[in-house]
Amino acid sequence: MLLQNNLISYDPSDFILPEDVSENLVASYESAGKVLRPFFGQTVSCGLFGIGDDHIEKYQSLDAKFVKNKASTFFFRASSNSMEPLIYENDVLVVDRSIEVRSNMVAIVSYCGEMYCKRIIKSASQVILRSDNPSYDEVLVTEDMNLIYFGVVRAVARELI
Amino acid sequence: MQENSSNKIYALVDCNAFFCSCEILFRPDLVGQPVGVLSNNDGCFVSRTKELKRLGVKMGQPYFKVKDLCEKNGVTVFSSNFSLYTNMSDRVMETLSEFTPNLEVYSVDEAFLDLSGFENHNINDYVKKIKTVVEKNTGIPVSIGVGPTKTLAKVANNLAKKSEKSQGIINVLEPRLRDVALKRTKIEDVWGIGKASSAKMKSLGIHNAFDFKDFKNDKLIQKIFTKVGLQRKEELSGCPRFELETRPKKKKQIMCSRTFSQGVFDIESLREGVAHYVSTASEKLRKQDSVCSSVEVFTRTSPFKNVSQYYGFDQRVILSGTSDTRKIIKYAFQALNKLFKAGFEYKKAGVRLTKITDKNQTQMSLFETPDSGDSERLMRAIDFINRKEGPETIKVAACGLKDKAIKLNRNFRSPRYVSGWNQIKKVL
């Protein structure tokens, strides 16, 4: 709450709640030539009506856009050209474990002890791991591969400079 | 005392072999393999996969004692990677908090949930859902025990972890199932029953949790094991005595000790070590807004090595409570000078801050000036910088500049997968 005689210009020490005002403080204010008066809640509005708080918006945040669930989001780095032209080497992959893998999504999977970023092609009878780069072969998922889904790639971040 | 006298429902969610699970999440080649994580300085095993347990490696066992066994069986060992574990712990707790606001983070890998209000037949589905979502979203496998008290939830959890059939969930809300569970729980596995207590219990003929619950003489229990012991007993029969503690409790003593990577003979190196440990401990002290008025210092030779043995201990009282690193170091050095004996090969040292009180309730002393405002501001600034820029960015000069002898061994540390950008996991 503001002191009435300081409505326009004030310094931070003027933000005093009435219940915080101890006798010492009153004394120091009085010696500084300031007068404490109770504040009754009415303010005088100045300036244009309507362009105040209602229109203050937050800055855009990449986290808010791409990290929908902080607890389930992990970052990986692409280290091959197998998903070009979608993903290039050194791109940062934003991976969300909470998303259910559907056909045609790009996901992080592991098999035979290694982690891969691949497009998942699901049909009724089989699952295929496809690389967007046509020079890589498709991989048909078999049971003995012990395929594990890590999570779905929600977004890709690439530094240009 | 009536069974089911309340309608409370508690669940204990516990991460399975937590540190190992964190490591394996980024190392799919280690799924189903014997894996272990070592304590600070690569000393002892603090986390083991069930494959490693099967090889006979025990919790707390020194690594060097089973090094050959590990190498022969292709065991993968890791140094502690605490930034990874705390990050993963946050994720698990965050996910759990979506299921109930009534959550007590009991340790880095355990949380109590208050699920009171759910009907008994719904609770199993709900708990199953909690398990599924935590495992899917974080990749960390968990076991869940459900019971009418925290102690019974813990009993159920222990059994859920051991039993393959339970698929990681055991519910002992039903009194019929509860007795079976209690009979299968050794007395030393009951929450809060330590080594000394369980020995005393056994001398009373109490060998498992059921014996304890059915023990007729409550007065004797209270006499030997105090009020808390009796409360444990009542919890085992289904009467809640311990509520969720959602606010962390302040520590009554703070300890910091380390094993050196090499033996140390001179007092200078020990001084550097002690200064380090005081710095770490007093930062924790300040974090909980406390002061201490006693500091203890110990150092010892290696009990595993065939050298002349010595254990030195000394304590100093600080008349006016303090949290100033420099002041505590001064007293710790006095203690060290007193206990140090030349000619021994020291392998470990540590400090403990005791007589801890609230910063604002400290007693004034006639003979000692309390921490000044300047001291407080300086410590606050140091803590702030070290939190922001990394531990020991600023440190007291007594810690030394080379850290040669007291440097930690971290020979098997995994990359910083989840903190920073340089070491994030690569995929093909």
Image (cartoon, helix red, strand yellow):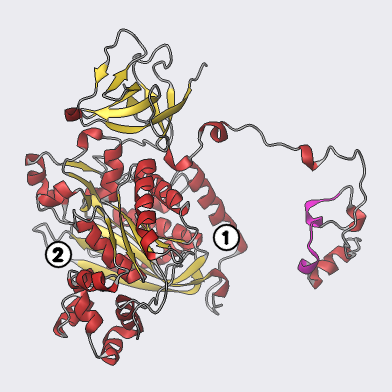
Identify the image quadrant of the N terminus of chain A.
Answer: bottom right
Residue B234, position as x, y percentages in the image:
33, 80
Disc number for residue B376 = 1
Residue B398, position as x, y percentages in the image:
41, 53
Disc number for residue B387 = none
Q: Which residue is more in the foreground, B115 or B211?
A: B115
Assess whether residue B200 is covered by the magenta stretch: no
Residue A135, position as x, y percentages in the image:
30, 7
Of circles 2 and 1, the one toward us is 1
Q: CA distance from mark 2 to mark 1?
A: 41 Å
Please give left or right for residue B67 compared with residue B22 in the image.
Answer: left
Location of residue B363 with respect to A30 vertically, above or below? below
Residue A80, position as x, y percentages in the image:
34, 16
Q: Which residue is more in the foreground, A121 or B315?
A: A121
Residue B13 in which image quadrant? bottom left
Q: Amino acid at mark 2?
A: Gln
Disc number for residue B309 = 2
Q: Residues within 10 Å of mark 2 (few under 14, many from 20)?
A: few
Q: Which residues are magenta?
A: A10-20
Q: Is residue B150 visible?
A: yes
Of the image marks 2 and 1, the number of the one nearer the N terminus:
2
Same chain letter for marks 2 and 1: yes
Please give left or right for residue B330 compared with residue A40 in the image.
Answer: left
Q: Residues within 10 Å of mark 1 (few under 14, many from 20)?
A: some
Location of residue B38 with respect to B313 vertically, above or below? above
Residue at image point 38% right, 46% down: B133
